[in-house]
Amino acid sequence: MKDFIIPDRDFGTPAAKSKQMVTLTIDGFDVTVPEGTSIMRAAAEIGISVPKLCATDSIDAFGSCRLCLVEIEGRNGTPASCTTPVAPGIKVHTQNSKLKQLRRGVMELYISDHPLDCLTCSANGDCELQDMAGAVGLRDVRYEAPPAAEMATHFRPKNNSGIANPNYIPRDDSNPYFSYDPQKCIVCSRCVRACEEVQGTFALTIEGRGFDSRVSFGMKSDNALASDCVSCGACVQACPTATLQEKSVIEIGTPERSVITTCAYCGVGCSFKAEMRGDELVRMVPYKHGKANRGHSCVKGRFAYGYASHKDRILNPMIRDSINDPWQEVSWAEAMEFAANRMQGIIAKHGRHSVGVITSSRCTNEETYLVQKLTRGVFMNNNTDTCARVCHSPTGYGLGQTFGTSAGTQDFDSVEHTDVVIVIGANPTDGHPVFASRLKKRLRKGAKLIVIDPRRTDMVDSPHIRAAHHLALTPGTNVAVVTALAHVIVTEGLFNEAFIRERCDWDEFQDYAEFVSQPQHAPEAVQMLTGVKAEELRAAARLYAMGGNGAIYYGLGVTEHSQGSTTVIGIANLAMLTGNIGRPGVGVNPLRGQNNVQGSCDMGSFPHELPGYRHVKNDNVREIFETLWGVKIDNEPGLRIPNMLDAAVEGTFKGLYCQGEDILQSDPDTKHVSAGLAAMDCVIVHDLFLNETANYAHVFFPGSTFLEKDGTFTNAERRINRVRKVMAPRNGYADWEVTQMFAQAMGANWVYTHPAQIMEEIAMTTPSFAGVTYDLLEEKGSVQWPCNEKVPDGTPLMHVDGFVRGKGKFINTEYVATDERTGPRFPLLLTTGRILSQYNVGAQTRRTDNVVWHDQDVLEIHPHDAENRGIKEGDWVRLASRSGETTLRATLTDRVNPGVVYTTFHHPDTQANVITTDYSDWATNCPEYKVTAVQISPSNGPSDWQEEYNAFAARSRRIAAAE
Amino acid sequence: MSHDGPHAKLIYMANQIAKFMESKPLDQGVQGLAAHINDFWEPRMRRHLFEVIDHGGHGLRPLVMEAAPQIRRPAEAA
């Protein structure tokens, strides 16, 4: 689709990467471009737009539309400028009478098979076909279907006698977000190529030949929804006509302005243009210059924003004395007074350590900073935690110990230089789809892939992608597998001695080498335990060590284990062993779950550290904040989320301010969480919706969406991206304003009037952010921390000349089996994960049309295990663990090994966390979501717990009618 | 999982840390365990841990007991 608001020039073909420059002349002007550049792009560089239809700079040139013809002096014919590369000294003409005539002829043919309903067409004003007709001066269309074949068009539904045209295909509206209208199609193949090259799904194809060529979603019987299409929107973006069009544009019309902002879903942090008409959001379009996504998007960021205006959204503050009462809507002032009185009462009675906060990984850096400031500077304790506790806290610990800082080492562009990729405990095609597309693009160009995952994820085997090795380990044995990989690398002499001698502590390495060389760490010794064949593991280790640039990407399948931190350390060890740190194409890359989980960790959300990962025990760090805030900061670590809940049950923790986080649904062992919440005297929930946690709340502050406020998010590559307000907050206030009002009600003298001032305070206090200002972000678009005097432009790659901690530290990684074990009562292992169309607990995506792809959580079970239990596809099954039981429907698949079952937890009805235990990572208390011993049996429907809980939830969501 | 006794969970957590630290040379393990608890355990949790340690450390792995002198005793309730 043409860009008509901020003209992001379309250069027609992708940029060439050659360092060799070539000079040529186009229409009398000299131009110098990299070798391999197309003539079309070279012309565009000097402002000459050669007419085109099938070319766009997100995909390779194709040369099918024949509109971009040029003449080159001394060469025969009129070559297509998109497919013809530049050559030194050639003289190109883009406009002369011959070219004009040829182009007009081509256009005339195109238009002869295109409806002329421009005024009522949804692409009116945004149609490249329309523009090109104008550009070539088309004034007449002489061709018509002949009387003998009057229906030889693709756009006339029937003839005058009412006989249907067999060439006419009606509009396909099956996808909830875009329509496919074949009558408008010019078969330029841009959609097909975008699906292949940009997204890597290969859902679209051209069927038929010549006049019969049609764009098709896979098989003839498939419509858009039934096909492999993942609804990423790349085809819609590429389409030059109204053939593939957002339904929102069909409904509203074209937008009139756009604002660049950052997606509020996963940790990839894609940049988008929010295209607006007035204060109505018309569509979200991936921003071409976004450095994380490079113009690509997924179904969530591109389309699933409808939750922002969903009827379930709460727009007024509410209070209640007891969680058994209905909610009462009140003014902001009343809500603040009520909340502050309760909190002050608790502090007076139970002491300053009896209250705390949970910051949100969905809110901005500025908002998170204020929430931790609230507990540290107003409540006067360090009881702050964030949802990173339940996802990447082991990353913080493990990378902090080994490298010296908690951060991924690369930018996403780095993947373009990778030769061997290890994906461990991550499912990027579902969890981090835009990164997955970039990874798949690299794999199609020949990079090798090793997947370490109990499930056969889409990365293992999908169109034109096949993993060289899939180590389908038994859940809970990551450390054994990672240590065995190190065993092979050390004992076979594949380690990079020069790197280790220069960059790491050689003595520590020798201790470590001795440790991993022990025979019990050999692949042969652990294969019974891990289920991974020794030969396969050895081959994978050799490939990673010797295959060129090796990069490791990992997710929650690494961290959410009893030994999550140990596995992160093991991964860091592997990268140091092989010297895969400190240059493009290598590194250790945690794929972060939420949009701002990196930022919330950076901003001091953890109870033991102030912003910038500095421990509260350090006097010099506390002093910085004490001076600025004029308070005394506690020098003892505070409570982590699970510890808060334990303390609540014990009776020493009574009040919680929880922003943008649904701990009841997302945290493990639901019954323990609800017992903890029920034991508190004041739970303040600050959210868009009455989430599950709000069932136990006394105060509800309505939240604002990412569209309604200014701020910044920091993505998994440490990139600080601006979030920009495109509409007024429907609840009245941005979240940072709400936190400030609450702090003021508690007696604080905060007077921020814009998030930029909060960022100033962050920069003033936190060395890795010292150079960050809104002005800088305005100028550069985004910046990766550290950004300070030493590195004013930020840091795309970490640990280039040396590790942050000095020498890289090898740490022994002894495998300790989790105590969550299978036995006769619970013989299967349950592991959990995500699906593309839903996000986290689903609070947002469940309130969009994304539910057409996933309307309930289902249990994946191997046919063998299903047959033993008499379970058939689609049956209700009872899923029971030592903690609890729930029911859901089963699906039979060999993606999981026998003995392993799998589900997602996007829907609150499923209550998958009723099943999960409270085992957790030894270092960080990150819960062990990925391993639970379970039993499965046929069932008739929802469990007693589900029914009781649903009744309770309905009761506790009542809002009293206004009097 | 089942936790018996009021401090069973803390004993379990301390032992988990001990199991990681046991793969280090003894002095580093002792120091590492104490430092970890000092850095990450809120005073309430350390107070409960000392209630166990001071009563003989029943259920704690030997490394925890060995590290106990280096674990910071929390100040009396603030």
Image: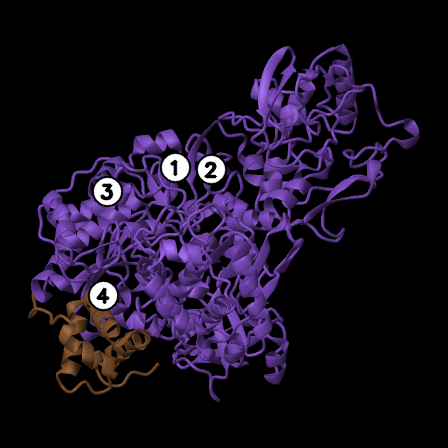
**Residue A760, x across and y down, in percent:** 23, 37
Numbered circle sitting on residue A353: none
- Disc 2 versus disc 4: nearer the observer: 4
With A67 as the anchor, is A882 left or right in this view? left
Viewer can see residue A705: no
Numbered circle sitting on residue A290: 2
Nearer-N-terminus badge (2/3): 2
Please tell me which residue is depicted at 54% across the width and 38% down the height of the picture. A248
- Chain to which the residue tagged by mark 4 belongs: B
Please tell me whether residue A531 is drawn above or below residue A42 in the rendered image: below
- Chain to which the residue tagged by mark 3 belongs: A
Residue underneath mark 1:
A782
Count neighbours of disc 2 (C-alpha within 10 A) and say few if under 14, some if 14 to 19, many if 20 or more.
many
- Chain to which the residue tagged by mark 1 belongs: A
Label 1 sits on a secondary structure element that is strand
Residue underneath mark 4:
B40
**CB within 8 Å, label 1 to label 2:** yes
Judging by colour alone, the chain drawn in purple in this rendered image is: A
Tell me how far mark 1 sits from mark 2, CA to CA.
8 Å
Image quadrant in which the N terminus of chain B is located: bottom left
Res A353 → quadrant:
bottom left
As shown in the figure, which amino acid type bears the numbered disc 4? Answer: Phe
Tell me how far mark 3 sits from mark 4, CA to CA.
24 Å
Residue underneath mark 3:
A762
Tell me how far mark 2 sits from mark 4, CA to CA.
38 Å
Nearer-N-terminus badge (1/3): 3
Tell me how far mark 1 sits from mark 3, CA to CA.
16 Å
As shown in the figure, which amino acid type bears the numbered disc 2? Answer: Gly
Colour used to depict chain B in the structure image: brown
| Residue under disc 1 on the same chain as residue under disc 3 | yes
